[in-house]
Amino acid sequence: MTSPSRHAAGWADLRDWLDARRRDVDAALERYLPSAPACPPRVGDAMRYSLFAGGKRLRPVLALASAEAVALANGADPGAARDAALPSACALELIHTYSLVHDDLPAMDDDTLRRGRPTNHVVFGEGLAILAGDGLLTEAFALMAREPASDDDAALTGRKLRAVGVVAEAAGACGMVGGQAIDLEAAGSGAAFDGDGLRAMHARKTGALIRASAVAGAVMAGATAAQLSAIERFASELGLAFQIVDDVLDVEGASAELGKTAGKDAAAGKPTYPALFGLDASRRMADECVTRALAALADARLAGQLPGIARWVTSRTN
Ligand code: GRG
């Protein structure tokens, strides 16, 4: 997979940009997330516990990078585009965190380590972990409806509504929930996936939210139809690369660095890219996805931090 050392100066810039955006996202999440007395303290604590446990914030930074890339291509202000996309970016992290909390439950993956900490249900109990996930999911849509305030701005209201639709579809039964259902059913029946089946499952389970992150950011920045289509192609490839790398790291990584139980997929006999294709071919496939992702951007003259984020996804170690 792509080596960071080949792009040393670019990597330093990207790292600074990512650090700044993560700070923006974390500060906004602090502001946006309800706490006592608006919501009962225990469920608020359980939501915060998983949200501020040190995730990479890939989905929100992708939304912000996408908004910025569209603004740069259209001669608009990238900072203003990021501000417009920030609530959607945070909503995507809320939804992603809910999915991890629910995925770790005994009825699903039954895991005890996530983001380097005991999982939500281990700390708060199963009932509260379910409610924390429900709360995170629901707050995401409340946030997107509320922010940025758009009472006197019909165009902004229209973009918000469109972004809500994009995110809801990606999170729902035709997207992430559907992908999780396919995975759950296969695990229960012992059915095997071939390469196409695995790709289709992941396109929903992890790909849909990654795609929606990039598309929602672009929508909030006022992207044209051609730009949206290019961003969607870019993010579809990125989502697949992300998943392949995740499977490779599950084989190669250490639990301490991953922040979750390493080797769990292999031990459970789960269908993964390395299991189907081997490690070398999997790494090659991830690189090929990134090549196609970059081509989609180049076709639409979109760039900003998006190319760097694509390379970061394949070089990550957690
Ligand atoms: C419960 C509806 C429902 C869905 C769960 C996404 C998902 C569906 C389950 C997660 C299972 C999993 C570990 C998938 C591998 C890819 C993935 C989503 C990894 C975690 O995402 P990162 O690496 O995590 O972005 P951080 O903690 O950095 O945010």
Image: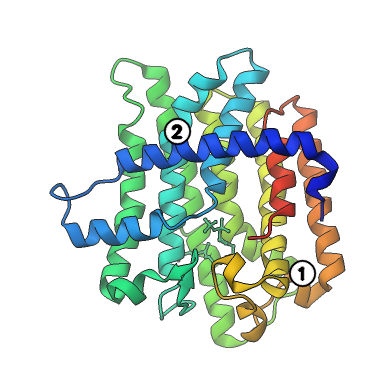
Q: Quadrant of residue 267?
A: bottom right
Identify the residue shown where x is 82% and y is 59%. 285
Looking at the picture, which amino acid does disc 2 mark? Leu
The outermost residue toward the left is 37
Ligand 1 lies under 8 Å from the Cβ of mark 1: no
Q: Nearer the viewer, residue 224 or 108?
A: 108
Dividing the image into 4 quarters, which one contains the C terminus?
bottom right
Q: In the image, is the residue at mark 2 within 8 Å of ligand 1 by its beta carbon?
A: no
Residue where numbered disc 1 is placed = 195
Relative image position of residue 27 (x, y in whole percent): 38, 38
Q: Is residue 211 above or below residue 305?
A: below
**Which residue does the image show at 49% across and 19% down from the upper left?**
80
Q: Reply above or below: 9 against 176.
A: above
C-beta proximity under 8 Å, tags 1 and 2: no
> Label for residue 86?
2
Asked whether, in this view, residue 295 is left or right of residue 264, the answer is: right
The location of residue 296, given as percent across then percent down, is: 77, 36
Residue drawn at the location 61% of the way across and 85% of the way down: 268
Crowdedness near tag 2: few (<14), some (14–19) or many (≥20) residues, C-alpha within 10 Å? many
At mark 1, the secondary structure is helix
Q: What label does residue 75 carry, if any? A: none
In which quarter of the view is residue 253 placed? bottom right
Q: Quadrant of ligand 1?
A: bottom right
Q: Is residue 87 left or right of residue 56?
A: left
Which quadrant of the structure image shows residue 183? bottom right
Q: Name above or below for residue 86 compared with residue 316.
A: above
Up-down relation of residue 257 to residue 38 (above or below):
below
Residue 77 position in % (x across, y down): 55, 15
Q: Earlier in the sequence, mark 1 or mark 2?
A: 2
Give the distance between the C-alpha atoms of the residues marked 1 and 2, in whole angstroms.
36 Å
Q: Percent position (x, y) of residue 116?
A: 49, 66
